[in-house]
Amino acid sequence: MVRFTGVNHLAFVTGDMDKTVRFWRDLLGMRLVATIGAQGFRHYFFELSETDTVAFFEWDGAEPVPQKRHGVAFRGPIAFDHVAFGVESADELWELRDKLVAADYEVSGPVDHGFIHSIYAFDPNGIPVEFSYNVPGIDIRRTPVFGDTAPAATAQEGPEPQPDKWPAVLRPTPPAQRTLKKGAGSALGSYREKAVR
């Protein structure tokens, strides 16, 4: 079975990379670890953790999305509700809240969700972001909790992946046929020796 290592990157869109860098790197404190770009296009990566990054494409003409409140029901086309990032302590959650408020960002919370405490804000692109601290002694990853009073039929099958619900792989790709196509940023490998420190 495939073992995921985390969120390699979440890819968002901005029309103003300077404002985005100021928010994600300078206000939130995420290091800018890779930049890819050409005329009319940029793709920047910010370090979230040792294994995870947040990335932004900058496209000419991209505009901030209308702010949609976190977790509030919505009708119509929608891609996602919000993205939540974890912090290590309650003190860090309050520190982050204070930094956002000092920078004149609207912040709601902290809110006690039982297993996490969270604050909510929007980045300069209108992206709804949540920052959460795991409540000590409650680890839903180790001990899943099911509190839905009318659960979906699939949820009633339990927390573990159900292996017989999809077709089995009958013809895996042989190693000799595993080829890669060059993509934007493939040249970054040649910059390793010149890495910014």
Image: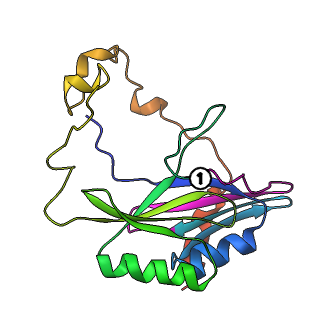
Residue 21 horizontal side relative to residue 2, left or right: right
| Residue 120 position (above or below residue 10) | below
Determine whether 144 is above or below 114 in the image. above
Q: Quadrant of residue 102?
A: bottom right
Q: Position of residue 16 (x, y in %)?
A: 77, 67
- For residue 79, above or below residue 168: below
**Which residue is found at the position 59% from the left and 52% from the top?**
11
Which is the main secondary structure of the residues drawn in magenta?
Answer: loop
Going 38% across and 16% down the picture, which residue do you hit?
Answer: 171
Q: Nearer the viewer, residue 45 or 104?
A: 104
Residue 48 appears in the picture as rendered? no
Work out which quarter of the rendered image holds the N terminus and state it. top left
Asked whether 129 falls inside the magenta stretch, the response is no
**Percent coordinates x, y for residue 146 in the rendering:** 21, 37
Residue 168, picture quadrant? top left
For the residue pair 165 and 79, the one nearer the viewer reads as 79
Give the camera-side residue of 68 and 89: 68
The amino acid marked with disc number 1 is: Ala
Q: Position of residue 80 (x, y in %)?
A: 55, 43
Is residue 63 one of those drawn in magenta? Answer: yes
Judging from the image, what secondary structure is the residue with disc 1 in?
Answer: strand
Q: Which residue is mark 1?
A: 11
* Whether residue 69 can be seen here: yes
Q: Residues within 10 Å of mark 1 (few under 14, many from 20)?
A: few
The residue depicted at 61 percent of the width and 67 percent of the height is: 190
Magenta stretch: give its range. Answer: 47-68
Give residue 138's position: percent from left, percent from top: 17, 58
Q: Residue at x 24, y 22 (%)?
A: 163
Determine the image quadrant of residue 45. bottom right
In this rendering, the answer to whether 151 lies above or below 36 is above
Answer left or right for 7 relative to 169: right
